[in-house]
Image: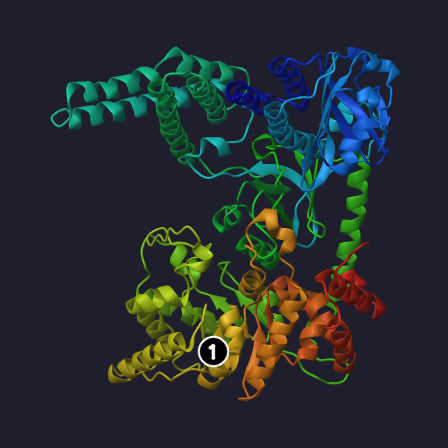
Amino acid sequence: MLAPLRRILEAVDRAPSLDAALAVLVHEVKDAIGADVCSVYLTDPDRREHVLLATDGLPPDAVGRVRVPLNRGLIGRAAERADIVNLDDAHTHPCYLKLNETGDDQYHGFLGVPIIQHRKVLGVLVLRQRAPRRFADDEVTFVVTLAVQLAAAIALARGNGELGRLSQGPGLPSRHLAGVAASPGVGIGTAVVVYPPADLEAVPDRPAADPDAEVAAFQQAVAAVAAEIGRLAERMSGTLRDEDQALFGAWRLMLESESFVADTIARIRAGNWAQGALRDTVANLVAEFDRLDDPYLRERGADVGDLGRQVLLRLQQGAAATPGEDYPGQTVLVGDDISAMQIAAVPRESLVGLVSRRGSASSHVAILARGIGIPAALGVMDLPVSRLEGWPLIVDGYRGRVYVQPSALVRAEYGRLIVEEQAFSAELDNLRGLPAETTDGFALPLYLNTGLVLEQRPLGIEESAGVGLYRTELPFMVRDRFPGEETQRNHYRQLLETFAPRPVTIRTLDVGGDKSLPYFPVEESNPFLGWRGIRITRDHPEIFMTQVRAMLRADVGLGNLQLLLPMITNTDEVDDALALIQRACDELHEEGHPVRLPPVGVMIETPAAVYQAEALARRVDFLSIGTNDLIQYLLAVDRNNARVAGLYDVFHPAVLRALIQVVEAARAYGREVSVCGELAGDPRATPLLLAMGVHSLSMSAGSLLRVKGVVRSISRTRAKEILRKALFCETGACVRQLLMDALEEIGLGGLVRPGR
């Protein structure tokens, strides 16, 4: 049944709406399996019923009208148990419920397959047969596969409001798409879709403002690719056999064929822009080739895809040559993935929210969003990226929710919340300039994390005790080669001067994992466990030495530099790095530079470093706990994988005990411990970190006043009592609730739940 399965999946994927997708699915499944009826029921937990959403075989007027009570009948049984129900005679089952509106009693064979996404039952796909029939295993597998595909379409329709219209239920609650709460706040605005270059699948739909101009741009792009093919053919004419040389001609025929050119132009004339029209044309052509039996001809589908990407690249290059995009006044940036460069391209005053299908609360996009104070919901797996251009959106960064085309009621409620947020922010402004000191006189310096943005926000400069973590990756990422020593020195000098005499902790280059350099690619099957951080610079001492020399020279006459070594897993790495730092210092002295040897610390972000914290503390001047990676490695959870984002728990009991172990190990040698991961900027965690004996916290600028509010409202004695109770908790949820209750008791619930 592979061929019909592929055909149905392609048809459902191409359907312009859920209504159209369901119509295709119920008809095709009924025919493919030879059933008498195929129907889809939507599970509506708010009304506690299953609504008939589509059917082929039952009376058409039953759609939207037939409603089965929740957990009743065989449909309810399949939904309640999230399991398949396959019966040769449904009438004999004790759960059978007769549905008079559909003439149900004339059907005996029954197959009910739950439609599940993220462990939630969205509905049931049902097949019926007049004669007694138990459906075969391959037929059941066929329907299960389609139910998985249908789950994504239903989730999408819930997010954009289409599902409410289809189910014909008055007053159906406004639905939302669920993701991860990545940066607090609420943003209301218009979606602007961003996407990577030369990726056809990522191209969004956009209206063609000037169809004639779009057609001309497309034709120019096709002509450019055709000319390039001609040049390639000429260049290879002396080295290829005639039959191989004919391939270039075949490419040009495909490129200039009516099915490629005319169909794309027709789609442009129908209203889509050139890139979106090209995407649909290529998808249709590739699907046609895939349906062919001949393996050679099927392979030509890959050629069409390659040609489409080449044309797309020319279109995008032409668009890049035009003036920059005019962003709406209230822009919500939307994408499969969003880069720092794409965020930086939007004027700060216009950007009100970020929404991404990928990413998590600890990804670098989330860190950047919190740093510039932009609400963000990431890991929204059901996000219909290509269809969202120009749509009104609400981003709830507190709960990780995205509302597509929100109702007036939802807009009004979130508008009220924004007003309350503004009032709360005004209260926090009263903390500016006050020391970060507990009610019983314990000082907890608050430092700034920076490096992902090109400039430090004034709030960070004014309020922070210095820089607790400066990430040096961005100056490397924005270039096409490694920056030289003098370039780096000037960059670090400006940073050190900005904060002098306050300390500035600069981390040596930490690339690899989810951070790559375009001119130094590191491609690995498991990059987070691969060649990254100190491992790269240890293997390339010339990179490390150039950077350290630049830092030491930048510090001359200031004396506020501190060095930080990333991704440490053993003492050999520290010993080697310290030797290189000493060598750089000696070399610069010999060259006549009056440099000093700065304090050096290591990042604790692997379980190995936790267990060797005492040996590490003996070698360096301070320890800095990077909770983002430490939690990832402790819990074996990829922090950028939206599928397991719910398992990434900053308050997991194992995390708390690891932090305590590091602080106690450092205490044995009188070393100070800072926390520079995102946990440091979470106001809920402040009482725990205070009680553990952490000496300082480093965070994004947007978190400084919130954390200061907690520090100034609690005693260290009270914090220790909260920690004592937290250590009895066996789950992160228990710890989280304990902290929320504690903040509510001291009147600071608004720090983490504004307006709620």
Image quarter for residue 703? bottom right
Pinpoint residue 200: horizontal percent, then vertical percent.
45, 31
Image quarter for residue 198? top left
Question: For this rendering, which residue is in front, 94 or 14?
Answer: 94
Give the left or right position of residue 172, taking residue 192 as reference: right
User: Quick check: can you spot residue 313?
Assistant: yes
Count the numbered circles shown: 1
The residue type indicated by label 1 comes to Gly
User: Going 34% across and 65% down the picture, which residue do you hit?
Assistant: 487
Residue ranking furthest to the left? 238
Pinpoint residue 645: horizontal percent, then vertical percent.
62, 52
User: Quick check: can you spot residue 182?
Assistant: no
Image quarter for residue 552? bottom left
Pinpoint residue 158: horizontal percent, then vertical percent.
72, 33
Give the left or right position of residue 178, taking residue 348 as reference: right
Pinpoint residue 121: horizontal percent, then vertical percent.
73, 36
Q: Which residue is mark 1?
A: 601
Classed neighbour count for the residue bearing mark 1: other residues with Cα under 10 Å, few (<14), some (14–19), many (≥20): many
Please say if 428 is above or below 157: below
Question: For this rendering, which residue is in front, 630 or 621?
Answer: 630
What kind of element bears circle 1?
strand
Question: For this rendering, which residue is in front, 654 or 270?
Answer: 654
- Which color scheme did the rendering employ for the protein? rainbow
Q: Quadrant of the N terminus?
A: top right
User: Going 43% across and 74% down the picture, which residue do you hit?
Assistant: 570
Q: Quadrant of the C terminus?
A: bottom right
Give the left or right position of residue 156, taking residue 164 as reference: left
User: Going 82% across and 31% down the picture, which residue do you hit?
Assistant: 172
Give the left or right position of residue 359, taking residue 421 as reference: left
